[in-house]
Image (spheres, helix red, strand yellow):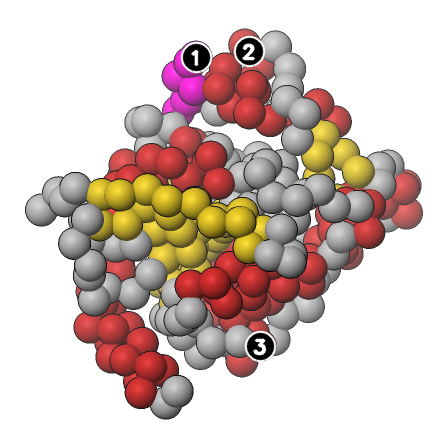
């Protein structure tokens, strides 16, 4: 059943983390969702997802990492993956209760880093940047030195002629590709965090004892689906594969994101009662 929704936003002091909220008009007992963007992104990437979930009774909170989109500026040359995991903690502190973490790309890796140390109700990882144990190879010194202290979408190859992007992301329309380029133009990302990921970010997956869903994209030239599969194996997670989806198409392509959102929603609904009970137990212990 589709419900009316309301939108809100919060700017969390003193850290300066910005969160956009989509929630059902009528309060729900379903666990909250925290949507976590990837490299160079922001809460804008989750607009369709957040609306879709809120219309079906799930609170959806889309955060922005430090130095990204509408959050406070930061010296990205010094930012680490643990810093991004700390930002997730700031957003959860504002929620006041553990959520299901829904992360894409580096947001998925940050979610794993958070869940390794702090309580969460579940993990949904879309094309996750793999932890060290799932990396296919390690870089050489030249590859590491080629990463600038702070990089942008042009350096990463996401701002270039539309026909080339169309080859990379055939599941996005021309209008969607244009929007991606517009939103990424001017965005900046941490080179130090990228070098960390290239070398391998250690995550003790044995300490992540929550239900997990990992989704891979068959046309992804950023996170190969085999890396997503290895990440799922490390977590003993449910694995789903969308062969015709690109990296951006998983969450932004009108041909793809409704299918992905439907799978995520189905997985959440199957586990909703157990998650609700876990959330109630957290509340009772306070």
Residue displayed at 25% across by 54% down: 58
Asked where in the image residue 30 lies, by quadrant, the reply is bottom left
The one nearer the camera, 113 or 245, is 113
User: Could one spot residue 219 in this view of the protein?
Assistant: no
Please name the residue that numbered disc 3 is placed on.
117
User: Is-magenta flag for residue 202?
Assistant: no
Q: Label 1, on which residue?
A: 174
Depth check: 284 or 51 in front? Answer: 284
Mark 2 and mark 1: Cα distance apart in space: 8 Å
Residue 217 in picture, x, y percent from top left: 44, 41
Alpha carbon distance from label 3 to label 2: 42 Å
From this view, report whether residue 237 is shown above or below residue 35. Answer: below
* CB atoms of marks 2 and 1 within 8 Å: yes
Residue shown at 60%/57% (left/top)? Answer: 13
Tag in front: 3 or 1: 3
* View extreme (bottom): residue: 285
Query: Does the rendering let one see residue 150?
Result: yes
């Amino acid at each position: 059943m589709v419900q009316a929704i309301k939108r809100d936003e919060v700017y969390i002091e003193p850290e300066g983390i910005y969160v956009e909220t989509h929630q059902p008009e009528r309060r729900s007992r379903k666990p909250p969702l925290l949507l976590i963007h990837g490299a160079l992104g922001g809460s804008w990437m989750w607009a369709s997802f957040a609306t879709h979930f809120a219309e079906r009774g799930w609170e959806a909170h889309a955060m922005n990492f430090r130095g990204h989109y509408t959050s406070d500026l930061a010296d990205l040359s010094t930012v680490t993956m643990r810093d991004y995991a700390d930002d997730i903690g700031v957003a959860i502190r504002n929620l006041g209760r553990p959520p299901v973490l829904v992360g894409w790309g580096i947001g998925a890796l940050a979610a794993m880093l958070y869940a390794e140390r702090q309580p969460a109700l579940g993990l949904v990882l879309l094309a996750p940047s793999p932890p060290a144990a799932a990396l296919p190879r390690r870089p050489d010194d030249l590859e590491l030195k080629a990463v600038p202290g702070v990089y942008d979408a042009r350096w990463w190859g996401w701002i270039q002629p539309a026909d080339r992007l169309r080859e990379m992301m055939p599941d996005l329309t021309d209008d969607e590709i244009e929007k991606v380029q517009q939103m990424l133009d001017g965005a900046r990302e941490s080179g130090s965090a990228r070098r960390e990921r290239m070398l391998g970010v250690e995550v003790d997956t044995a300490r992540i004892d929550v239900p997990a869903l990992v989704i891979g994209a068959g046309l992804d030239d950023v996170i190969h689906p085999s890396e997503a599969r290895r990440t799922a194996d490390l977590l003993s997670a449910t694995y789903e594969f969308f062969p015709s989806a690109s990296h951006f198409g998983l969450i932004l392509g009108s041909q793809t994101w409704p299918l992905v959102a439907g799978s995520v929603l189905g997985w959440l609904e199957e586990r909703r009662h157990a998650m609700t009970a876990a959330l109630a137990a957290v509340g009772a212990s306070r």
